[in-house]
Image (tube, helix red, strand yellow):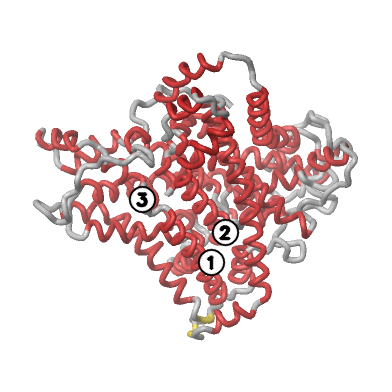
Amino acid sequence: MTVASSPPSRLSLRDIEGTPPKPKIREKRERDGGGRGDGALAALFIAPAMLGFLVFLLWPTLRGIYLSFTRYNLLTPAEWVGLDNYVRMVKDPIFWDSLTVTVEYVFINIGIQTVSALAVAVLLQRLTQSAVLRGLVLTPYLMSNVVAGIVWLWMLDTQLGIGNEIIAGLGFDRIPFLADETWAIPTIALINVWRHVGYTALLLFAGLQAIPSDMYEAAKVDGASEWRMFWRITMPLLRPVLAVVLIMTVIGSFQVFDTVAVTTAGGPANATNVLQYYIYGAAFGRFQFGYASAMSVALLVVLSAITFVQYRLTRAGQTDLG
Amino acid sequence: MTAVTATTTKVRRTERRRLSPGKVVAWAVMAAMVLITLLPFYWILRTALSSNTALAAHPGDLLPVDLTTGGFERALGLQSTEEAIAQGGAGGGLKFWRYLLNSVVVSTLITVFQIFFSAMAAYAFARLRWRGRDNVFGLFLAGLMVPTIFTLLPNFLLIKQLGLIDSLLGISLPTMFMTPFAVFFLRQFFMNVPREVEEAALLDGAGKIRIFFRVMLPMASTPIVTLGVLTYITSWNDYFWPLMVSYTDSSRVLTVALAIFRSQTPQSGYDWSGLMAATLIAALPMLVLFGFFARRIVSSISFTGIK
């Protein structure tokens, strides 16, 4: 794949924003409404986004919470049942199973992805500065999860997949990667690592760019090895960035759905029945919209807790949000 | 990018010593990573160009087996049903061009409107003065906390009530007006445009609307292109939401069609070459799009670009 060459724009985002942990110098903002206001104009500018926000984000959020307290099958009006759905959820062994499966998936997926992405990012920083390589590692991210799932389903096929051809060629037994209860979740986790590792690596790389290169030069003069520099310079300085990237990817990882849908459809024997897949089945397979909403709220609570942890971790504040 | 090229020359000079064993290992790791990244792409191509019936006999061949374009013909619906079944296909028609068009329409609608409306809002948050501005922005930011997946069920019900189920507009609407991320991302940029630029235009007698179109938007072309390409790729690859909303070919997008194509398994086993041809055709537009803007995107994925 050729990377189309355009003249490097003098005004790249990074120059303008100044990446953390450099302190940002920003002009002081005036207080709301001070001086001559632009009220009417602002209303005009904000109207479309505001409409979208209220109709497709705020309202659905409130409605989702409301629905979790009802029984609703799309055909008859929703009927208020109080905490029934939540009681049912707590007693539902399949729900707990799917939560366990999801957590297992997140652990494997995030563990391997973070280590690999960190390795790639550091190699891109210390070994080569090739922009072409940076473009190449991003290519899997251009595929949809559906495509990634189908491709690996083929490559890992027990009888015909190239993966098992190599394994058999080396004299081992073929592994039914996606048809085996033990292998299925780690395999799906790895498929998604393949798709996202490059993007994650580039985010970390952006964080690494903020570390002044003369720190490495100085350490080199003192005779420090690359390994030592990594632990003494890179890791401590990258930690805040790493924390944010980690939380973000964890939140994304919890919402796994597409890959499961096209590879195993929750099987074998519910071994890959991740939470999102179970919720989807409850809503569109069994038309239990109330129960599906209650499980969505549970997921929302889990993810909010993670976001809160992130907020606490990064409150040292390098971004407007932190 | 510019900063990077400046440092490489300095590094080069110190590195012209011999290859240390550590460096060899590092290059080996890098090469392995690139190989794992790219191998599937080659395997898609190799399989797509193979004859489906011959694949079973030579699963390990590195080159296409019985070179044929049959897979592509089946994916594009160019083969007759009998012919397709004879070659191990499902014979289920795949109205490929229809799905491709649907994907293009949905992704274009979402990208163009979302970026434009988000840029307008971002400008109002960054550059206009009005009562309650910071509170409203805080509300938008709170929207970042809600995972997309949480709003899908209620949004499905809303689209259903609006009578837009199974329509391209129904698929596009929820993200057509804004995403909190897009507003936040562009606001960051507008905040950092020097005030003098705006003041100079005001002195020339330009109104704020004119400034937005003539000064701010052109200045923000780099972040807008980056955000635009990422938005396009995201909506092109989306599966869960279109799966909920579309029921028939009239609104089916490529990702959903692919998953259906995969589930139409013939008795004899998968039509792997047809499937791989279909995935390749589905992914190709994004590879081309990325190829055009790669340099700009790769250098401007910045750390703030992830919140």
Which residue, given by chain and number where applicable, does mark 1 sit on?
A: A299
Q: Residues within 10 Å of mark 1 (few under 14, many from 20)?
A: many
In space, the residues marked 3 and 1 are separated at their CA atoms by: 27 Å
On screen, residue B91 above or below B218: below
On screen, residue A263 above or below B84: below
Q: Earlier in the sequence, mark 3 or mark 1?
A: 1
Residues at circles 2 and 1 in contact by the CB criterion of under 8 Å: yes
Q: Are marks 2 and 1 on the same chain?
A: yes
Indicate the quadrant containing the N terminus of chain B: top left, top right, bottom left or bottom right.
Answer: top left
Observer-side mark, 3 or 1, equals: 3
Residues at circles 3 and 1 in contact by the CB criterion of under 8 Å: no
Q: Amino acid at mark 1?
A: Leu
**Where residue B98 sits in the image (x, y, percent)?**
57, 46
Give me the residue at 32% from left, 35% from top. A16
**Helix, strand or loop at disc 3?**
loop
Task: Say the numbered circle drawn on residue A254.
Answer: 2
Subunit under mark 2: A
